[in-house]
Image: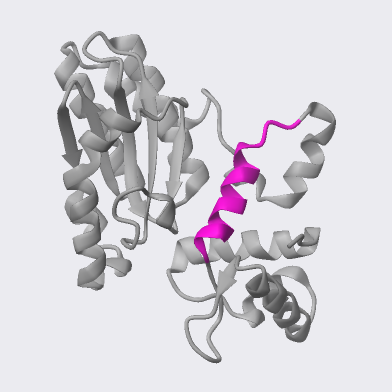
Amino acid sequence: MEITKRQKEILFAIIEEYSETAAPVGSVTLAKLFGVSSATIRSEMSKLEEADLVSQPHTSAGRIPTDAGYRCYVNSLTEKSEPAQAQETKTEINPARLLPGKGDRGVHALEIRINSQQRADLAIREAVDALAEMTGNLGIATIDGRLYVTGMSRLFNQPEFLDINRVQGVANLLDNLEPWLREAAPGEPLNIFIGGENPIGRTSGVSLIISKFRSPYSDKSYIGVLGPTRLNYARVMSLVQGAGQALEEVL
């Protein structure tokens, strides 16, 4: 189902608001943002729900994004637009959320931390620690059969993980992550698995963002972040990709 430009803008606004609050987003909030009536917003939300891009947790609640809604958002972030299309793309999403480049302060700080380490194992650990600290989620790396993980308490402090089933889903995902990566070997520099797209832990309500990078230890080395689906995708994607590039240079 095709959606209009305004519906896409409303979807992206829901995603960004939900990322900050972890609470369903109502029509009143969006009506103020878009300068239209609440009735107009509710009508557009209904169409987004029909397209399976948002859902309503219960009657009279606001909307939350679905995995398909997040996928639409992430695809827009990763589109490689021609220069002539750049302005059109920027009107569709918050420019502050576009993937930053090498000049981004967060990426630069990450690179400094990784480059400060003289040993390869310490550089990897520093990269994982930095990702956990800077994203507030779980930092992970897997290199030559070894899995590095940090930030478990940060991840489980997120409100989503008051549900024990989600905690168990994350545990299952982590138990099987390294062998799955070794077998599947996602080949893109940046790989994004949202919610049910995860081949393991499908019901855990998390997204996995990983970057494959070259290292002398393994041709299947990965660095990444695991967090709830309401991640700040642009920031996390930028940091994960920056960490992978920095490790390639150090290793």
Location of residue 213 (image quadrant) = top left
Q: Nearer the viewer, residue 1 or 26?
A: 1
What predominant SS class does the magenta segment belong to?
A: helix
Q: Position of residue 19 (x, y in %)?
A: 47, 61
* Residue 106 can be seen in this image: no
Q: Position of residue 173 (x, y in %)?
A: 24, 50
Location of residue 11 (image quadrant) = bottom right
**x 65%, y 80%: residue:** 27
Residue extending furthest right?
Answer: 84
**Quarter of the N terminus within the rendering:** bottom right
Say left or right for 101 vs 86.
Answer: left
**Quarter of the C terminus within the rendering:** top left
Q: Does the magenta stretch include residue 76?
A: yes
Say left or right for 10 vs 175.
Answer: right
**x 57%, y 46%: residue:** 74
Q: Nearer the viewer, residue 201 or 99?
A: 201
Would you place residue 92 above or below residue 215 in this image?
Answer: below
Q: Which region shows up in magenta? A: 66-81
Would you place residue 168 above or below residue 124 in this image?
Answer: below
Q: Does the magenta stretch include residue 91?
A: no
